[in-house]
Amino acid sequence: MFVLGTRIEEYGLVVEVRPSWRLARCGGCGARAPGYDRRGPRRWRHVALLEMRVWLEYAPRRVDCRGCGVRTEAVPWAAPGGSFTYPLEELVAYLAQVTDKTQASRIAGVSWPAVDAVVERVVERCRAASSLEGLRRIGIDEFSYRKHHRYVTTVVDHDAKRVVWAGEGRSSKTLEPFFEALGEEGCAAIEFVTMDLSAAFTKAARERLPQAQIVYDRFHVQRLAGDAVDEVRREIQRDLAGTEEAKELKGSRYALLKNAWTLTVPERARLAAVQETNKPLYRAYLLKETLRDALNYKQPWRAEKALRAWLAWASRSKLAPFVRVARTIRKHLGGVLAYVRERLTNGIVEGFNNRLRMIARRAFGYHGPGPLIAMLFLCCGGIVVRPLLPTRD
Ligand SMILES: [Zn+2]
């Protein structure tokens, strides 16, 4: 790019420029092409100079491209059709990565919708076409936004530790475009899929990745037991309604649900009281703890033995919620035992999703999933943005 001159206008500093290449290039395909005619001057918004807006100005030619026909020429400082220069877009994307949308919009001096649009364009540019290549171990999870009315499903690569795909919805059909993009060969190369005990994702994985081992996330399995303890407690509490014992039980909720090693002394005392006075509830507590211990075994055969013993105990426990949990785990046993062998959890996917939930909360006003998904890729997709930052002394 050559600078031809500058002038100050009411709306800011205008820098007249032209591409450094002589022969024009087609805006459609980038190939050199003969000039056709010249349009009037256009302006591109550039990185601001302190409080002064800066614009690049150039009158683009139209070219007669062999492949594309008559097109506006490409310019080296901005994407075809874009109204921001690349340096401004990189700066906005970088700010969106390191801070929130409001700050990015303030510092770069562009509107909120412009931040969204820039993030989408930069992600589009930076996401390598090969981002689905070499996938072997993936994780699938969903997260909700807009007060839990809308869902986005994400796919992560456990090995590269980044998000590789995202789409709106959470049904078995949601993943269809992902499998399409992955292709037959790509699908066949997947060895492990981690997920929660979701029927929709299980169905999708069984159909499209029949050779892959499903690994159910252990923390979701444990959560089933935690929920069952709570259900047992609530039932007993209902039966005892109005008595001193019911009040006591209500206070023991956290002690029953917490991990044993994080219990405080008063919580331990509460548990001891439950053990003394309420046998079924204490049994529920022990079942929850024992399930965790079973999944903790490092040797797969020990874990499997413990898990099978647990299933037998839970089924005979006379606690309806645990009988149900045992039934669910039995139904998913292959995928639960796969965890024991592979030690893969959905933790990485959920970590990303927590981050995205934070982004969605911090900058509500994401009306469609498009900008939100772009933001997810920008922040968790392994995209490196290199803005032009001042060098340090
Ligand atoms: Zn062309």
Image (cartoon, rainbow, N blue to C red):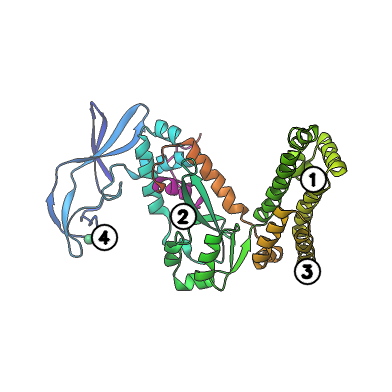
Residue pictured at 32% horizontal, 43% vertical: 85
Asked if residue 386 is positioned above or below residue 211 in the image, the reply reads above
Secondary structure of the residue carrying tag 1 is helix
Side of 24 where 138 appears, left or right: right
Kind of element beneath mark 4 = loop
Amino acid type at image mark 3: Trp
Does the residue tagged 3 have its C-beta within 8 Å of any atom of ligand 1? Answer: no
Q: Disc 1 residue type?
A: Ala
Q: Earlier in the sequence, mark 3 or mark 2?
A: 2
* Neighbour tally class for label 3: few under 14, some 14-19, many 20 plus, Cα within 10 Å: few
Cα–Cα span, label 1 and label 3: 25 Å
Image quadrant assignment for residue 54: top left
The residue where tag 3 is placed is 301
User: Residue 44 at what x, y percent from top left?
Assistant: 27, 40
Magenta range = 370-391
Q: How many discs mark residues in the rendered view? A: 4
Q: Which residue occupies 56% across, 67% down?
A: 136
At label 2, the amino acid type is Ala
Percent x, y of residue 191? 58, 69
User: Vertical placement of 377 versus 157: above or below?
Assistant: above
Do the residues bearing badges 2 and 1 touch, measured as CB atoms within 8 Å? no
Q: Which residue is mark 4?
A: 29
Q: Which residue is mark 1?
A: 260
Ligand 1 within 8 A of label 4's CB? yes
**Percent from the top left, x then y, of residue 309?**
80, 64
Residue 375 belongs to magenta span: yes
Label 3 SS: helix
As measured in the structure, the alpha-carbon distance from the residue carrying label 1 to the one carrying label 4 is 63 Å
Is residue 122 in sight in this rendering? yes
Which mark's residue is nearer the viewer, 4 or 3?
3
> Which is in the foreground here, disc 2 or disc 1?
1
The residue singled out by tag 2 in the image is 166
